[in-house]
Structure formats: structure tokens, C-alpha cells
Amino acid sequence: MLPQELLAQVRRLEIVTGRLVAESFAGDYLSVFKGRGMEFAEVREYAPGDDPRDIDRNVSARAGKPFVRRYVEERELTVVIAVDLSGSQDFGAAGRVKRDAAVEVGALLAFAALQNNDKVGLALFTEGVERFLPPRKGRRHALAVVREILAFQPKRRGTALGAALERLARMLKRRCILVVVSDFRDRGFERALKLCALKHDLVPVLVEDPREAALPAVPAVVEVVDPETGARAALDLRAQAAGAAREEAERRGELARTFRSCGLEPVVVSTDRPTIEPLVAFFRRRAGRRNR
């Protein structure tokens, strides 16, 4: 895109997503995330009414009587949006590609953080982390986050999700809300995903396209190209559509099991549906569980 086109698109996203945040998103973001960060304040002797889960066993054992750890709420949060820009993100058969959906997710979260005076950072990755914007506050920085997701041209086309997550785990020293936006079309990243989930409040956003789940079973042979490796192959749609659908269903089942083993609930975003709806539904489910 030319600079003028890029600026115009960023401005349109600011207007549209900013309105969506104000109308239906900010309250859910606030109820789920605000005040989740807790900073240690002191240890004091246990008093009736204190939560037994706050008892510090080491101090209590040394003192011979129960002591509890006290915390203060951290009002300022840090949100880091990690976006997969590998070749598969350029696929889309529903009028927009998966990268378009990732841009919208990033814009919604960046402007929600801006509205709540939180810091927002960005990591763009393929076979590793190619671009990192440290978390900062302010409208200018939020716009820079959106602009980078829109315009950044990655050097590589492949995906190494495990390596990217391990790098982020080392880079992010303090606990944050880490939102990973990807189609998760990779293997061997389970350990890194679990590590990030232990260190941070990890929210996986799974971006899908309906054509990935079901090919058209029509009498045609088409040439397909792997967007990450460039490999080409002939595909007989009538003969191979059913097998491809089974393989994709198995892959999605395996991915769902991976998320469950890490204690994660993914937000599933599809290119053929509005992006904000699954985000709002996810936050409301989390808010409901937190309130209970």
C-alpha cells in the first residue's frame, strides 16, 4: 500500500473499531481483565475473615502461627498482541484473508487498552519474532500497533510457533495479558504454549477460513500451492475432498486437546463472520466464571 492508502486504512479502522469498543467491547474487557494483576504488599498475622488460601506457609511455619500475604490491585495492565504473519495468513475464500481478521482483532484490543489507559505491545512472528513494539500507552502508539499489523512485510513465510512463543516468554519479564492471534497450523509448540500460559494470562485467538474445513466436491483437478513452502501439487477435488475434510477434522481435534491440556479456551474467529462477536462472547463467558 502507498503511505496515503495505509494512513487512510488505519484511520478507518480507528473509527470503526473505536466505535465497536465504546459500544459493546470496553465493558467486557474491563470486567475480565481490570484488576486481575495483583502486586505483593505485605505479610501480616492471620485475622478472622481472611481467606485461608492467602496463608503464607513458610512464614507461618517459622513464626509458629498463621500469617497471610496481602496484595494490592494493579490498576495498569499490559496487553501484548502476538500476531502470526506466516504465509498461511494470506489465505481466504470468504471475501477476506485471515490476516484481515488478525488486523481487526489487533485493532479492537489496542483501542480497548487505549480506552482503559493500559499499555499495549505487539509481536509479529513467522519462523521467529520478526518485529516487536514494547508496550506503551497512548493513541499514537495504539495506531502504530495497527499500522504494523497492516503493513509489515515479513522476511519469512513459514511458521515456527514454538520458537516464537519461547522467545516471547524470555522477552516478557512481567506478567501480562498475552493474546496470540494465529491459525495454529504448526506442530511441536505445546511445551512453549504451556510455558506462556503459566507465566501470563494467555488468550489464544484461532483464525480460520471455512474453505479450510471443506473443499468443494466438484469434478475438477486444480493446482494448489503451499503458501509457506511454495510447493505445488495437483488436487482432484471429487476424489480427495472427503479425505482432506477428515484430515482437517483430526487436526482441529488435536489442537482442541492441546488447548485443554494447557487450560486455555480459544477465541475462534472466522473470515466469513464479524470479528467482534466471538471476542465479546469469550469475554462475557470469562466474566461470568470470574463472578461465580
Image: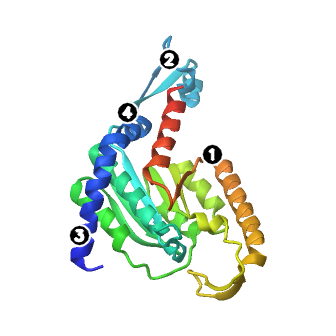
- Mark 1 or mark 3, which is nearer to you? 3
Q: Secondary structure at mark 3?
A: helix
Among numbered discs 4 and 2, the one appearing first in the sequence:
2
Q: Which of 276/110 is in front? A: 276
Q: Residue at x 69, y 87 (%)?
A: 234
Q: Which of 124/63 is in front? A: 124
- Check the picture and name the quadrant holding the N terminus: bottom left
Q: Secondary structure at mark 2?
A: loop
Among numbered discs 1 and 4, the one appearing first in the sequence:
4
Q: Kindly tell me whether residue 176 is visible in this rendering.
A: no
Q: Which residue is mark 1?
A: 263
Give the distance between the C-alpha atoms of the residues marked 1 and 3, in whole angstroms: 39 Å
- Horizontal arrangement in the rendering, residue 173 relative to residue 26 (left or right): right
Give the distance between the C-alpha atoms of the residues marked 2 and 3, in whole angstroms: 53 Å
Residue 35, horizontal then vertical, whole percent: 39, 35
Looking at the picture, does residue 112 appear above or below residue 228?
above
Q: At label 2, which amino acid type do we have?
A: Asp
Is the residue marked by circle 1 packed among few (<14), some (14-19), or many (20+) residues within 10 Å?
few
Q: Which residue is mark 4?
A: 73
Q: At label 4, which amino acid type do we have?
A: Glu
Q: At label 1, which amino acid type do we have?
A: Gly
Q: Residue at x 57, y 51 (%)?
A: 266
Q: Secondary structure at mark 1?
A: loop
Mark 1–mark 3 contact, CB under 8 Å?
no
- Horizontal arrangement in the rendering, residue 209 relative to residue 17 (left or right): right
For residue 7, the mark is 3
Q: Which residue is mark 2?
A: 50
